[in-house]
Image (cartoon, rainbow, N blue to C red):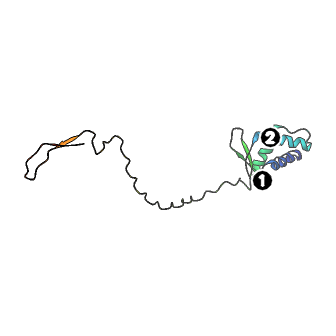
Amino acid sequence: MTNEQQQLTTLLLNLLPADHTTVGNSTLLERFLAAAQAEGHKPPATEDDFKTAREALVAAGLAVKGKGRGGATARATGAQRPDFALGAPTPPAPAPAATPKPPKPPKPNPHRRSPTPATPRCWPTATPTGARTTPKWAW
């Protein structure tokens, strides 16, 4: 690797976030070309220089390839980027004991007939001796 390629590889490594988050390759390419131009690299850096520097970082274990439509790159520590750790799931906190609710009073039925009818009723009455007399009317 030439001195120019080594400088571009170091430049690309410095553009990768230190917190190991991935950066899309198109965004990283734009930042790489702008940083190379700002440092005054002659001849100007190209997309091929970016790909070469990226592959060199991946081969050295300093960067890892990410997923995505255009690809992504992230800084690695050692041979690989640290992934999230899987732990045992914590059980949910027990819910407080529910107190039983008192039953609701029944709702009045608007379609039920009232206990006192609107029409008069008659019934026979009896005398103390048990003889029946004329019926009595009730309203």
Q: Which residue is drawn at 65% across and 54% down?
A: 84
Mark drawn on residue 18: 1
Q: Where is residue 83 in the image (x, y as percent from the top left)?
A: 67, 54
Q: Residue at x 86, y 39 (%)?
A: 45
Q: Which residue is drawn at 87% across and 47% down?
A: 7
Mark drawn on residue 59: none
Q: Where is residue 55 in the image (x, y as percent from the top left)?
A: 77, 44
| Mark 2 Cα-neighbour bin, 10 Å: few <14, some 14–19, many ≥20 | many
Looking at the image, residue 94 lies above or below residue 22: below
Disc 2 residue type (three-letter) = Leu
**Along the line of sight, which residue is nearer the eye, 28 or 93?**
93
Residue marked by disc 2: 29
Q: Position of residue 63 (x, y in %)?
A: 75, 49
Name the secondary structure under disc 1.
loop
136 relative position to 9: left or right: left
Q: Earlier in the sequence, mark 2 or mark 1?
A: 1
40 relative position to 98: left or right: right
Determine which quarter of the picture holds residue 139.
top left
| Mark 1 Cα-neighbour bin, 10 Å: few <14, some 14–19, many ≥20 | few
What is the total number of numbered labels drawn onto the structure image? 2
Q: Measure the C-alpha gap from mark 2 to mark 1.
A: 17 Å
Name the secondary structure under disc 2.
helix
Whether tag 2 and tag 1 are in contact, CB under 8 A, the answer is: no
**Along the line of sight, which residue is nearer the eye, 126 or 115?**
126
Looking at the image, residue 121 lies above or below residue 79: above
Determine which quarter of the picture holds residue 36.
top right
Disc 1 residue type (three-letter) = Ala
